[in-house]
Image (cartoon, rainbow, N blue to C red):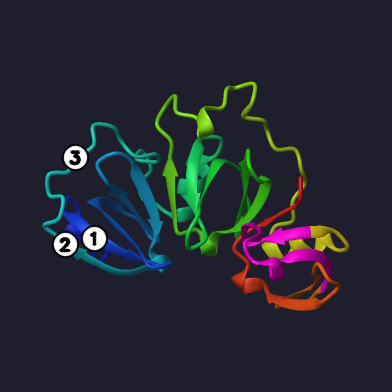
């Protein structure tokens, strides 16, 4: 039983990693994730990123949802189960401190998942950095793209079981970490060990990046 159980059905406020706040009805609690309804959509928030949770009188007029969250037929929620149930559905994922990514989950591996974005193409996202996931409503599509412009295509690529092992496949390739917001995270992957990746960035400088702090990886289009 979770210590949060007494808050189920109440309006709560969450303080999330990245200085973000979420307010909504606490719908359910899983082993490592909670489900919030903010009056418009369900948010699936991993417990590891919840700094604080408390009941609140703010927005107490939020009506309870008429629909059920994904995975509601399961005996219990977990991050992995939520990701599996969300596979192939359009969704918004929040990874970095200031930007959401829109698209759909294609594959779930041991400690990361792949996500197709019409903006970034195929992305690798370590599970530990997922702040929250919001499935789209039925019939809703990213950027109003048509099925021809954004088809739900089965993912054919063979993947390593872990994120670090998958990164090794990109040796000698140009890679982009964390959406490319930091120029020190765009470069040629030279080598890596169990903890760090060596990159050669724009002006042939060498930087070393801690693998544990990499939030996303994608290749240039």
Quarter of the rendering occupied by the C terminus: top right
Q: How far apart are marks 3 and 1 (CA)?
A: 16 Å
Residue pictured at 81% horizontal, 67% vertical:
202
Residue 146 rendering spot, x and y as whole percentages: 57, 22
Q: Which of 204 and 131 is in front in this view?
A: 204
Q: Report whether 86 appears left or right of 161.
A: left
Q: Which of 37 and 59 is in front in this view?
A: 59
Q: Earlier in the sequence, mark 2 or mark 3?
A: 2
Q: Name the residue under label 3.
A: 64
Residue pictured at 70% horizontal, 78% vertical:
195
Does the magenta portion include 177?
yes
Quarter of the rendering occupied by the N terminus: bottom left
Residue 184 rendering spot, x and y as whole percentages: 71, 71
Q: Name the residue under label 1.
A: 13
Q: Name the residue under label 2.
A: 55
The residue most toward the front is 203
Q: Earlier in the sequence, mark 2 or mark 1?
A: 1
Residue bounds of the magenta highlight: 175-191
Instruction: Please tell me whether mark 1 sits on a helix, a strand or a loop.
Output: strand
* Residue 44 - label: none
Q: Report whether 16 appears left or right of 94.
A: left
Residue 185 rendering spot, x and y as whole percentages: 70, 67
Marks 2 & 3, CB-CB < 8 Å contact: no
Whether 2 is drawn above or below 146: the answer is: below
């Amino acid at each position: 039983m979770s210590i949060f159980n007494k808050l189920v059905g109440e309006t709560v406020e969450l303080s999330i990693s990245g200085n973000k706040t979420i307010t909504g009805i606490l719908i359910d609690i899983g082993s490592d994730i909670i489900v919030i309804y903010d009056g418009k959509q369900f948010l699936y928030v991993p417990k590891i990123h919840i700094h604080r949770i408390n009941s609140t009188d703010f927005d107490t007029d939020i009506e309870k949802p008429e629909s059920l969250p994904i995975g509601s037929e399961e005996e219990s929620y977990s991050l992995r189960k939520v990701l599996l149930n969300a596979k192939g559905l359009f969704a918004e994922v929040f990874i970095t401190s200031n930007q959401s990514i829109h698209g759909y989950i294609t594959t779930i591996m041991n400690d990361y998942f792949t996500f197709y974005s019409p903006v970034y193409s195929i992305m690798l996202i370590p599970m530990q950095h997922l702040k929250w996931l919001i499935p789209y409503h039925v019939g809703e599509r990213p950027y109003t793209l048509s099925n021809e412009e954004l088809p739900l295509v089965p993912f054919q690529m063979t993947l390593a079981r872990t994120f670090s092992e998958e990164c090794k496949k990109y040796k000698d390739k140009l890679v982009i970490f964390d959406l490319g917001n930091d120029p020190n995270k765009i470069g040629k992957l030279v080598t890596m060990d169990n903890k760090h990746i060596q990159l050669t960035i724009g002006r042939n400088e060498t930087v070393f990046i801690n693998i544990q702090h990499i939030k996303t990886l994608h290749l240039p289009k």
